[in-house]
Amino acid sequence: MSLRDLKNEKQILDNNFAKTKNISFDIFFIRERREKREEKRNREREMGAEEIWNAKEVSEEARDQCSSSDIPFSSLIIDIKLPLPQLKPRIINLCKDLFKKWLYLDDSRFTIETVSGGITNLLLKVSVREDDENDSFVTVRLFGPNTEFVIDRERELMAIGHLSTAGFGAKLLGAFGNGMVQSFINARTLSPEDMGNPKLAADIAKQLRRFHMVEIPGSKEPQLWNDMYKFLERVSGLKFDDSEKQRKYDNISFKEVNDAVSQLKDLTNLLNAPVVFAHNDLLSGNLMLNDDEDKLYFIDFEYGSYSYRGYDIANHFNEYAGFDCDYSLYPDKEAQYHFFRHYLNPDEPKEVPEEDLKNLYVETDLYKLASHLYWALWALIQLLLPAIRRIQKAKGFIVFLGSIISFQKWNQLRSPSMQLFS
């Protein structure tokens, strides 16, 4: 793209976004990225098929281990809304149906407790006393109702097989009508504050690099923008019984939302960011640490898909804010560079060229806006799901999306990279 083309792009953006006075970057960075595309691609081969760690071996082993005959399946469906006392006998029956070695064990040998009750799923820990000395542990995950609106369960099951073979997350042990059974991970869930710890941040960066190297069968076309457009189509005509909530919702201009998504898509395309298999939901709750073994785990791959490297990293950075959305916790430039160094060169992080750090900083900075938009639209999709509608209304996500689409608020959220064209 020529400088004249970039100026034209600038004019288009100026028509839609108010100008800001604080320009943090020179347009040179974007132009330089375009001119040195081939040089950059050569460096990015470390993140490509030529050096995908053990990707081919992983794919072959996963294919061998994840055939339908290897994973037991039960047609049982368990109501996620039941209280724990009523869930217990149903979970025991499920375990006996899936794992024949437990079929004749007395129910008293099973202990069931809630591990977490997330917005969309319920996770249970099952302890089984197989004999007088040995206990076995598994986790049962019950999918939330109607979550197929936002999650491709077939893709998730396939990804789990390959990722667990590559050493990520819990092993898939069985599946049933509305959930799955996995091996139990003896570790604690991280907090948002933990993610800012320099040592943990470095460990997360190193593991995310390895995660991005795993190849998952199927289409490698990024689904980020398609998902956003699908969300927009589904929520544009949402109606509420509460007139005040309807009034707030009607203040959202979905045409402006659609335009914002399209403009951001066009802008990020200028970056030519690498496409990788991304976690897409690497918040603190999906990171577990065994303190005794100093071992870090990535879990819950239900949003995993091929996406842009910068998006996955930016989404992780956004999650530093936690559920309270305290964006004062968002990592500053120094903390981001620390993460980038260990992501780009785990063995010699201090040897990463300054240019590579700047490029990844710009890439991540732009995609953080895409992350904000994605989850705001995701939150509106949740309003279509009766089981979790109350939770989402309480969180005020309608107001949040309205704030994003308000151009005044949008300018406050704009990244330094967006100011390139101001």
Image (spheres, helix red, strand yellow):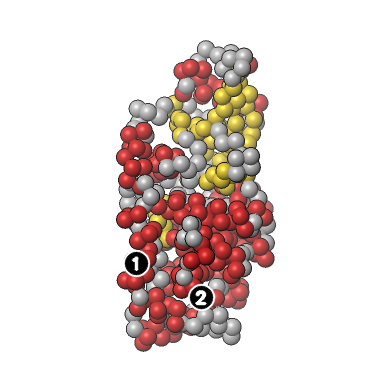
Looking at the rendering, in which quadrant would you find the N terminus?
A: bottom left
Q: Nearer the viewer, residue 287 or 264?
A: 287
Specify whether residue 352 is in view.
yes
Q: What is the CA distance from the residue labelled 1 to the residue labelled 2?
A: 21 Å
* Residue bearing mark 2: 417
Q: Is residue 269 left or right of residue 92?
A: left
Q: Nearer the viewer, residue 94 or 368?
A: 368
Q: Residues within 10 Å of mark 1 (few under 14, many from 20)?
A: some
Tell which circle, 1 or 2, labels the residue nearer the N-terminal end: 1
Q: Nearer the viewer, residue 152 or 65?
A: 65
Circle 2: residue type = Ser
x, y percent for residue 303: 47, 49
Mark 2 residue element: helix
x, y percent for residue 387: 58, 43
x, y percent for residue 299: 52, 44
Mark 1 residue element: helix
Give the residue at x 56% y 17%. 130
Circle 1: residue type = Arg
Give the residue at x 55% y 73%. 415
Instruction: Say above or below: 370 vs 81.
Output: below
x, y percent for residue 82: 61, 31
